[in-house]
Image (cartoon, rainbow, N blue to C red):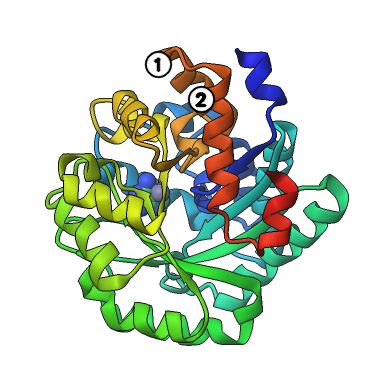
Amino acid sequence: MTDFIEGLPKCELHLHIEGTLEPELKFELAGRNGIDLPYASVEEIRAAYSFDDLPSFLKIYYEGMDVLRTEPDFYDLAMAYLRKAASQNVRYAEIFFDPQAHTSRGVPFDIVIRGLRRALIDAESRLGIRAQLIMCFLRDFQAEYAMATLLESLPYREWIVGVGLDSDEKGNPPVKFKAVYERARQEGYLLTMHCDVDQENSTEHIRQAIEEIGVNRVDHGVNALEDPSLVEAIRERGLGLTVCPISNGYVTDSMKADAIRRMLDLGLRVTVNSDDPAYFAGYVQENLVALADALDLSREDLVQLERNAFEITWLPRHLKDAYL
Ligand code: ADE
Ligand code: ZN
């Protein structure tokens, strides 16, 4: 099945670009920027990657990105990911970035977006992989900072397809960002947000995301299965769910493979994605292989997962159809 998955044209819809920063590139950027890393080797960095919940992962994730300082750093980060994705036959990706994780430590918004944008353009012409950017707000910062970030993004509106919400969910429900999302919709952005797996109030957060925010998609959203009215709402609206099996295994006690099987059987638009592959040791290929092994997936199941993904992309209909 590994070969079949390799040959399958794939789509990645839940991928934090800062979560693709591999230890090798971390060292290179640290050297370039004159930063002393508290690790002697790539192996030592990887050995420090031990997390068992979302906050313990996020601490290492934010520390790691301190080496990203200049426009070429963001270019190299995105180019490395797009090269890897293209090598796995990923044809299209929607890529999250966390501007506040950079502006909050003094790296200007325009440095971040210009580097990422330049990589997307070069990757499309050189590697034949298409990608779009989704700007995420950090939910553990104040809503006012998210609004200021949204306004700061407007000069680059044409380079960003939608907005998302990530970081620590505990105590930071979707409705905290209601005004920000309303403004984002007015500006023409498409809307998604994380409803991470097994959080406090997971089902209530999914309900808020769908009913009060009116998202076009839900990132993770696995806990919707606990409430039949949420399953119905997701089905009725045709919402996609971007699930990340290997990531689930790191931040909870399981990959949630059985939940993904149920979502497929219910006909929901569930998709398989990698989240933070440099930290969770698995890009989209490895996620699909892990899931196929756990569930004994058929070729039809795998094709369905990728059809779901291309179907829920935020591409214009004619481009979407070209992949389907
Ligand atoms: N930021 C980067 N990865 C994340 C995840 N898996 N959940 C929430 N915020 C994130
Ligand atoms: Zn995520």
Asked if the residues shown at circle 1 and circle 2 are in contact, with their CB atoms under 8 angstroms apart, the answer is: yes
Tell me the residue at 54%/32% (across/down).
304
User: Which mark is nearer the camera, 1 or 2?
Assistant: 2
Nearest to the observer: residue 56 or residue 254:
254
User: Please, is residue 133 above or below residue 67 in the view?
Assistant: below
User: Please, is residue 80 above or below residue 186 in the view?
Assistant: above
Tell me the residue at 55%/26% (across/down).
302
Percent across and percent down for residue 192 are 41, 62
Percent across and percent down for residue 124 are 80, 54
Element type at mark 1: helix
Going by the numbered disc 2, the residue's amino acid type is Asp
Corner quadrant of residue 117: bottom right
Residue under label 1, please give it: 295
**CA gap, disc 1 and disc 2:** 10 Å
Q: 10 Å neighbourhood of mark 1: few (<14), some, or many (≥20)? A: few
Residue under label 2, please give it: 301
